[in-house]
Amino acid sequence: MAINDAQRAQIETGQGFIAALDQSGGSTPKALGLYGVEPGDYNGEDEMFAKMHEMRARIILADDFTSDKVIGAILFERTMDAEIDGKPVVDLLWQDRGVVPFLKIDKGLENEAQDVQLMKPMPDLAALLSRAVDKGIFGTKERSVIHAANEAGIEAVVAQQFDVARQVCAAGLVPIIEPEVNIQSASKGAAETLLAATLARHLDTLAPDQPVMLKLTLPETVGLYDDVSAHPNVLRVVALSGGYSTDEASARLARNAKMIASFSRALTEGLNVKMSDAEFQAALGGNIDKIYSASVA
């Protein structure tokens, strides 16, 4: 199946950022806690995910959550399969909000080895990609983590990411390759320098019909990823907030002109389930404005 040309153009050249709404099982309780929903407010996994879906629906339906500032959104698998106000979420995003839908496909992280965490095996990847295409998904996102400047570990992370990316491309989707560098790493800058060089080597192995995106930690060296952003196979380089506050993440992003945001925690900072609709809209709108401004700076 061919890539949607209108969606590709928006992702490649659109002004704005990509919202990360893909918190999964492990990160959901923390995300809900920050939103003011405590474990005692739900009973079991199904109720927990229902609470998370209510939060995501409130974000997606907000006045400022449109393609004017948000050009794409990354979804959790359950969200891809869900509805908001009786309409499939993927259709609502693209048809009603003008926002390009992506899907998180990784199944979490392996235990740390060689100072990195690889992705867990994805035995059902082919079936998931086929279902994503049928649902109208444009691209995918898959995350690994780098904890230190270990050359062998970084090579293992990038090699695995590109193996998965080729499978995603073969399914007719655009992969977001995400080798996150831990912002707490004592060798963060050195790890990022190694990562930039490793990414450049692997990008040169792609065929012309294998477009990818990169999702990277905001670097210590301003402009570090400018070269990879100019690679002919790279549609866009997006930045993860990685635990930085909204203000800090936005300030770092504004200094890296070739990156746009793909924030999760920074997008939802300060939101609370007890807010009135007006309060919620104002708080979310403020976060969207900050992230948008930094992305187009």
Image (spheres, rainbow, N blue to C red):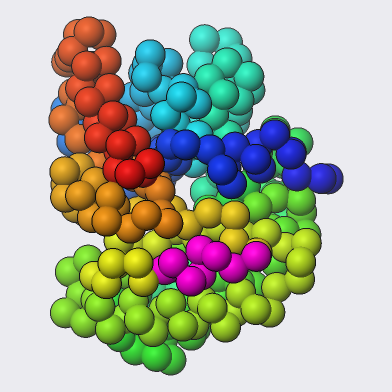
The magenta span reads 225-232
Give the quarter of the image for residue 59. Answer: top left
Is 170 positioned to the left or the right of 205 in the image?
right
Q: Residue shown at 61%/74% (left/top)?
A: 203
Q: Residue shown at 75%/44% (left/top)?
A: 3
Q: Is residue 114 visible?
A: no
Q: How far from the left and from the top, in percent, is residue 1?
A: 83, 45
Q: How far from the left and from the top, in percent, is residue 65?
A: 41, 23
Total numbered labels: 0
Q: Nearer the viewer, residue 255 or 56?
A: 255
- Residue 222 in the image: above or below residue 63: below
- Residue 40 in the image: above or below residue 64: below
Is 8 positioned to the left or the right of 111 in the image?
right
Q: Residue shown at 51%/63% (left/top)?
A: 229
Q: Is residue 131 magenta?
A: no
Q: Residue shown at 41%/78% (left/top)?
A: 195
Q: How far from the left and from the top, in percent, is residue 113?
A: 36, 84
- Residue 117 in the image: above or below residue 15: below
Q: Is residue 172 visible?
A: yes
Q: Is residue 227 magenta?
A: yes
- Image quarter where the C terminus lies is top left
